[in-house]
Amino acid sequence: MSEMRGVVAGISYSAIFGFSFLMTKETLGVLGPMELLASRFLIAALLMSALALLGVIKVDFRRKNLRLLALMCAVQPVAYFIFETYGVANAATNVAGIILGALPAGVAIMGALVLDERLSGIQITGLAMSILGVGLVALFGQAGASETKAIGILFLTGSMLSAVVFNIASKKASATYTATERTFAMMWSGAVCFGVPALIQNLIGKGHMHMMLSGGAAAAGAWGGILYLGVLSSVGAFFLINYSLTYLKASQSAVFTNLVTVITVLAGVFIRHEAFSWGQGLSVFLIVLGVAVANSSIRVAAGRRRALS
């Protein structure tokens, strides 16, 4: 049952992240990258602190080794979001989703080396299918290539590698810290590390926060994007990632990131009215099927336990 909860958490966080690229793209039209990061994580940190003060959530870092937690927070959110935000600013939305498709493979390799996780033949097959699906998205989805720069691809690759390290670090940290504690530390790390440079930018007159306070349709849309990114994409999605890593192998949890590509493609079709080809349809099918196959061992194991009982 706990493993199935991890699967549900994986599907949920991929759905939230699938729309986050659109929200980031829209909000960057008003705020600078550092201001966007500072705003979303400050909102997330204050929300989690309020929940802790009200007793809704519990956090306790006393008498625990903080080194692994510090590493986890350094790569996610700090390194990851610096790379991702500047990458999205210099690349098309679909390109961002495509590069993240390599994440499950990276996590599977690191999981085997660091965590001694072993994948079955059927799990490897599912992982390969989902990666193939992402590759087909890259092959058939060439829209927006003109807005993609080499520096954008470099930044997005950095974000993917940061996410690989985060998945391994969070999995190891799950033995000591709850999902809530890991998420709490991540939100405050982001608020401090991004908040200081954003504050300096606005104090010296190079910031854009005055545009958020001026009102208008653009400012209203940016506030909506920040709330989505701060509450859902930060607190909600990262809690779900940490929760899934508590119960699943790092490679099984990471494979759900390929569903982000599916959501990103469908969001582009239904929200931005982008074209949807048969090749993209085949890609979506392979990704979804691959994710299901990669996690099929959970259902098999659950069935065996029921039979034995």
Image: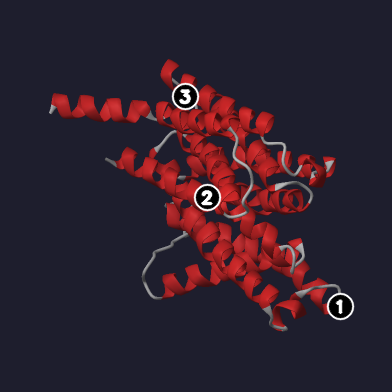
Q: Name the residue under label 2.
A: 65
What is the secondary structure assignment of the residue under circle 3? helix
Q: Can residue 114 be seen?
A: no
Q: Quadrant of the N terminus?
A: top left
Coordinates of residue 16 in the picture (x, y in percent): 50, 53
Coordinates of residue 231 in the picture (x, y in percent): 52, 65
Instruction: Name the residue: 61% across, 51% down.
Output: 273
Circle on res. 126: 3
The quarter of the picture where residue 193 lies is bottom right
Q: Crowding near pointer 2: few (<14 within 10 Å), some, many (20+)?
A: few
Q: Nearer the viewer, residue 206 or 167?
A: 206
Q: Is residue 94 above or below residue 38?
A: above
Measure the C-alpha gap from mark 2 to mark 1: 41 Å
Q: In which quarter of the image is the C terminus?
A: top left
Camera-nearest label, 3 or 1:
3
What amino acid does circle 3 point to?
A: Gly
**What residue occupies the far top of the structure in this picture?**
121
Which sits earlier in the primary sequence, circle 2 or circle 1? 2
Q: Crowding near pointer 3: few (<14 within 10 Å), some, many (20+)?
A: many
